[in-house]
Amino acid sequence: GAGGQIIARQRIIAKLSRPEVAEAFLSPAPDHILQKLAAENKITAEEASLMREIPVAHDICVEADSGGHTDGGVAYSLMPAIIRLRDDMMKKYRYGKTVRVGAAGGIGTPEAAMAAFMLGADFIVTGSINQCTVEAATSGLVKDLLQQMNVQDTAYAPAGDMFESGSKVQVLKKGLFFPTRASKLHELYQRHRSIEEIDEKTLRQIEEKYFKASVSSIYDKVKAHYSNEDISKAERNPKQKMALIFKWYFRQSSASAIKGDPEAKVDFQIHCGPALGAFNQWVKGTELESWKNRHADDIGMRLMEETASLLNQKLGSFLQTC
């Protein structure tokens, strides 16, 4: 820039939930990566030099326990820790511009948003409450279920895309069998070396209740979905074959929910956190009680306006007390 400041045309916001990951994004790009990019003529030597003066991410968003993939983080612990880390990294590298720290996970009401700002958040990101709006790209049947949920109506289930590692997603549980069935499949995967080891009664239950098809027919669908290399590995490793068959259920449960298949309703996989339950209680008795009146932009504006009003009230009460 004209004043000697470094200007990056591309900007990154990193959404994260662990301090060591935050530290990587709050640091300049590693030298070995910069050297490799320069050697491949993807950046110039001058750009490599300048990138040592700025962090990888311009802003970071701290994700507490959220809908979908989650580490189950607690905002009250994460936010102070990562804000202090940000301050330390700012001092260490003497960046010219402050890296802002936002908050996400569990934010669905003015009270929750206020708590995030009081913890030091520079901005907030909402997720679950947008899942139940006109704009959300999922079925009306899913939105009907989400509109009726409360704060206690979620559960943790194995993540289909990281099935083998046992990572978790937070999903809607009210009126649905998905969380229990997903956990059962992961338990069977952990306990057995192949699908042939599963007892006949359990296997028949999976075929009739979970898959609504035979294991062999599901494997035919699996073979059409994965590469020849993946299938070859599965043929050599019975446990990997079992994982691919079980993971079909997770893909199907998401697809059925998005499509709104009434025949597969109990198996819907709907990623969502308690924030939506709190939001439903907040808007109960108003025009926003029905998801058909909920628009993501309107919700965002209303949430910020109500949060500002609440902050002013709390600050006024505090000053009066003093």
Image: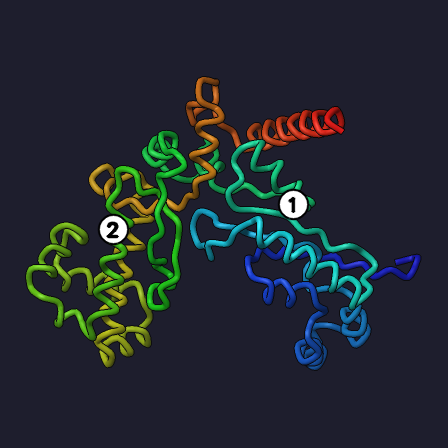
Where residue 302 sits, quadrant-wise, is top right
Q: Residues within 10 Å of mark 1 (few under 14, many from 20)?
A: some
User: Considering only vertical position in the picture, is 103 above or below 113?
Assistant: below
Disc 1 target residue: 119
The residue shown at (72%, 69%) is 28
Mark pair 2, 1: CA separation: 35 Å
What numbered label is drawn on residue 232? none
Amino acid bearing label 2: Thr
* Percent x, y of residue 47: 78, 70
User: Considering only vertical position in the picture, is 267 above or below 295?
Assistant: below
From this viewpoint, which residue is outermost toward the front? 322
User: Considering only vertical position in the picture, is 73 above or below 272?
Assistant: below
The residue shown at (23%, 52%) is 181
Q: Earlier in the sequence, mark 2 or mark 1?
A: 1
Amino acid bearing label 1: Leu
Side (left or right) of 45 relative to 257: right
Q: Residues within 10 Å of mark 2 (few under 14, many from 20)?
A: some
Which numbered disc, 2 or 1, marks the residue closer to the eye? 1
Q: Are marks 2 and 1 in contact (CB under 8 Å)?
A: no
Disc 2 target residue: 180
Front in this rendered view, residue 81 or 256: 81
